[in-house]
Image (cartoon, grey):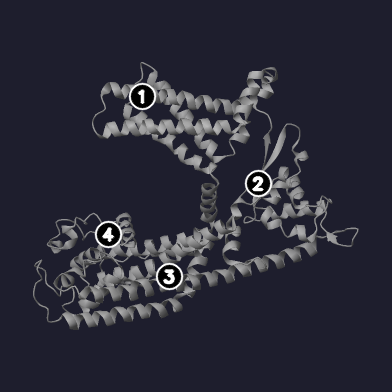
Amino acid sequence: VIAFATCLVAGFAPEFRLAPYLRVALLVANVPEIYGAAEAVVVMLPKFFDVTSLLALTVVLFGWFAAITLDDYEFENREGVQVNQGFQSLGEAIYTMFFVATTADFPDQMLPSFTYDRAFGVFFAVFIIIAVFLFVELILAVVYNEYSDHVKGKISETFTNRAKGLKAAFELLSDHVADDGEHQISRESFEKLVAETNKVEKVPRVVADEVDFFFSIMDDDSSGAISKKEFYDVCNILQYSFKKVRTTSWVERTFPHLAAQDDFQAVRRFVHSPLLDAVTTGLLVVNAVVVLIESYLDLTDTLSSGGEEAFAAVEVLFSIGYMALLSAQLLVVPFDEFWLSLRNRFDFVVTVLLFATAIVWVWPTVHVSRDTLHRLTILRLLRLVSKLELLPRYRIIGECVVNMLPASVGIIGILYCAGAAWATLGVQLYGGLIYDGNEALEDTDYLDAKYDVLNCNDYAMSFISLFAFVTAGPFHEMIEAAEAVTSFPGSGYVYYISFYVVGILIVFNVFIAFVIDAFLSQYENDRVSAVDENAESLDQTMAGEGFRIVAQRGSTKDDVFRAMFLEDDD
């Protein structure tokens, strides 16, 4: 505010805008998961700098050694390139070795000297082993170790406080004494508890129809009251939602005489047997082969107009086949139960959409282009990918990934915030300056490589440029362009190298290690495939005639954190 007011008094428009950085700060401050991740990153910085200083020292020493060794090699190798290119001064040599440590464009930095004498390859090999294979990986280990230690302490504290809170709540709510003298919570007190927790925004709301289900699932011994041990499960159980679904389909309820026919029973046996999945998968495989053949003929320009019509007719037949299978399912399976599955929803939408498109295509007065029909058909092939769920090994992997996503919100958020802050700074430093036609960029490797589309002229492009930077993109070329257009010499080095340190060595390393740890903790313990005892203990007699109760789990974030950071006895 002071800087802005000073600029106005001085009579010129300020070039620096604070608002974008405040937006990032507000995001961090208002999202607890991101704030927690940011706090953990700050806490681990001292240990990070301890290891990073060793990497920096290695870069400086090797840069100094390369500079004094290649100082007198001021001639060209057999390729016509200066032998000491990149090492003509101490500063240039240190920058080149840092560049090598990022592995971006390597071995381009080595080739001028290596082409002259292969002995220089030993020098670079030793540096790669020490800097990249040792210190960069050590940074990854230290960063995540410190991060996980901090998060483990927070998670342990959270669950400890939760246990203390539940203990105090139980002592306050218990109003019933069992025959063995153990204090319990009566049904009346439980209903009063639910009424109060519904007033708290952060606690999942329990509607009136679900009170019976929650009480039933907590009352493991069916004693009519909740013991202390049972009450400790309340936080886990509140993550559930309950739905009443019908046990009979619309046809069975509306036309019972039809449902009693042998043909209908044959359809029922087909739908509930493994044969349905086998037929669907077989049809999808054949459809995929047809699409691949058609795509090959199209790409090789050997598909005639008559062939296009023939393939379109075949796609119509496939659409009719898929619609028949879907209709068979809906004849037998209650729609509300069918709709609970996300995979069923996707199959339903795709099947109905493509069937409607096929009908419209057949209709003589309506024109549907062949390209449109072909592109829509690709959607159907995604169903083939979803069939991997039928294989246990792929189902577990998929469930592991889905379960760890909620736990990854914090670290993904801090990764975005780091990119957003640097992208905003890039726009303010280099916005409108990096473009093809700028005389300052003539004869630069940046323009020669056609990288001018990667610029900082707006926020989106600046963010994408940093994304390319994360993936070991045009490191040297981006710095070269920034240095060529800026009025602050050295700012390009500071801007991109600081992002490399913060965005890649710290935040991105934490993200990679977190993902690996979260996945392995779920996969190795096989937690996602375990039977949910809480859901299995539902008393189905409360559902009423013609209905059954289905329990759906909400966030699995707590389960992931327990598996990652807590021991079984914690």
Q: Which of marks 1 and 3 is nearer the N terminus?
A: 3
- Above or below, 109 relative to 462: below
- The answer to whether marks 2 and 3 mark residues whose Cβ atoms lie closer than 8 Å is no
Q: Residue at x 14, y 56 (%)?
A: 437
- Location of the C terminus (image quadrant): bottom right
Q: Can you identify the residue that label 4 sits on?
A: 456
Q: Which of marks 3 and 4 is nearer the N terminus?
A: 3
- Which type of secondary structure does the marked residue at label 1 adopt? helix
Q: Which of marks 1 and 2 is nearer the N terminus?
A: 2
- Left or right? Give the position of 320 relative to 15: right
Q: Which amino acid does label 3 sit on?
A: Leu
- Which type of secondary structure does the marked residue at label 4 adopt? loop
- Left or right? Give the position of 258 relative to 452: right
Q: Which of marks 2 and 3 is nearer the N terminus?
A: 3
* Disc number placed over residue 312 in the picture, else none: 1
Q: Residues within 10 Å of mark 3 (few under 14, many from 20)?
A: many
Q: Can you identify the residue that label 3 sits on?
A: 140
Q: What residue type is labelled 4?
A: Cys
Residue 118's x, y, as percent?
19, 73
The Cα–Cα distance between marks 2 and 3, rounded to whole angstroms, is: 40 Å
Q: Can you identify the residue that label 2 sits on?
A: 241
Residue 433's x, y, as percent?
21, 61
The Cα–Cα distance between marks 2 and 4, rounded to whole angstroms, is: 46 Å
As rendered, which of 301 and 418 lies closer to the eye?
A: 301
Q: What residue type is labelled 1?
A: Ala
Asked if one can make out residue 475 in the rendered structure from this viewpoint, the answer is yes
Q: Earlier in the sequence, mark 4 or mark 1?
A: 1
Q: Which amino acid does label 2 sit on?
A: Ser
